[in-house]
Amino acid sequence: MKQSRNGRNAQTRYGANDAGVSNSRARQRALAIGIADGRREGDPLAELKELLRTAGVAAAGEMLQQRPAPDPNRYFGRGKLSELKAAIAATGANLIACDDELAPRQERGLEAALDVPVIDRTAVILDIFADHAHSAEGKLQVELAQLEYNMARMRGLWTHLDRLDGGIGTRAPTRGPGETQIETDRRLARDRIAALRRRLTQLERNRGVMRARRERASLPRVALAGYTNAGKSTLLNAITGAEVGVGGRLFHTLDPTTRSFALSGRGCLLTDTVGFIEKLPHQLVEAFKATLEETVLADLVLQVVDVAAPEERRLADMRAVDEVLEEIGAGGKPRLLVLNKADLLAEDERSEALLRHPGAVLVSALSGEGVGELRERVEAAFEDTLAEVELLVPHAEGSRLHELHEVAGDLERTERSDGVLVRAKVPVAELYRFEDLEVAADPG
């Protein structure tokens, strides 16, 4: 696959910015580090560097250490730390960004050895989430995740106050202001976490009421799932005709967005949720469980893949999505693979992609190519849930026609002297609502 089709061109056409970082953080230059255990193909730090770019931090360089697992105290071994310190001086980096989530002990050990601030991938993601959350619920979820992440890192913030003089005749120092401050901060954090969970529970109840209304209308539910920046929001717009904001940066969409569209006249709901990445921190999955629940409750999941990405990157993205879907309990949901950004491929590359992913649908959300076929495949996926019926709606019960149309979509109607004969496809779960509309011989 040529670079002009899947690399720089892909980023330019879908809104990414190769060179830029935000002016507000231009002075932050991070040196990306990670452990290479031989299990990941390609550039092991590619995702971290993209996360940094999205957060507005310039990448000053990178360093990997070959070892089976991180050092429990300082992440890198002692010898590699010396190399890392030299690299910091050579590159002018003023920040270390680690590709794994660091234990508080590892973070403190690294900062003590390097004398520069250290952040891990979870901190970078939380920073991006805080920047991209717009709804009240999204902001609450981000704050909850930040507090839970920081709770374990409060230790050591007040060590400069720990060793105060003890009382007369005592061997050990008394409980000083340092310990008191830590306990106060932790108590305040725990209180705030409890308050946030209560508010999120209330919002979840409100959303449950809205969801129950949709369920009563028996509208099929489809969810978009995929690696972040795969083009899910653009695809939502292409299918539904909505004008949801899109962007070429990771986690552009945090809040779930639901729009309706019609399949043969029958209403259907399509929801776009937060994108997935490799090693998505567990506390983020927990904090955004209410958001991700839309995927769990969907009748069909459209797994959106950036088909223009290099093959090893594409397969890694698909594995990351599989892992998160399993973690949230949606691994067994009916799924349709959607290969997006087909406009960036040559004809031979399209054929190769379909050979590698049989049964997938090749689309371009940007140009609209293949979206019609995708709608047909979605409609076909729901065929087994429908039953063909013939019902007679008396003239005096005209409102029942509207009720039928809501759940069945297009109706085939024949006027009779005793009512309207309707042939339609009705969801099996809704047949009980129309049991009284029996068909009898035409008296006229």
Image (cartoon, rainbow, N blue to C red):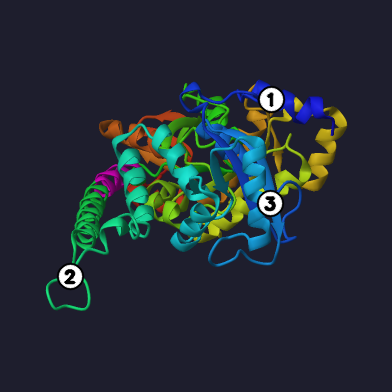
The type of residue carrying mark 1 is Glu
Q: CA distance from mark 3 to mark 2?
A: 43 Å
Rendering coords of residue 421 (x, y %)? 42, 35
Q: Nearer the viewer, mark 1 or mark 3?
A: 3
Q: Residue at x 44, y 39 (%)?
A: 127
Q: How many marks?
A: 3
Numbered label attached to residue 166: 2
Label 2 crowding class (10 Å Cα cut-off): few <14, some 14-19, many 20+?
few
Query: Outermost residue toward the front?
Result: 169
Q: Main secondary structure of the magenta part?
A: helix
Q: Residue at x 51, y 28 (%)?
A: 27
Q: Earlier in the sequence, mark 3 or mark 2?
A: 3
Rendering coords of residue 28 (x, y %)? 52, 32
The residue pinned by badge 3 equals 83
Q: Earlier in the sequence, mark 2 or mark 1?
A: 2
Q: Compare residues 139 and 336 and report the one nearer the observer.
A: 139
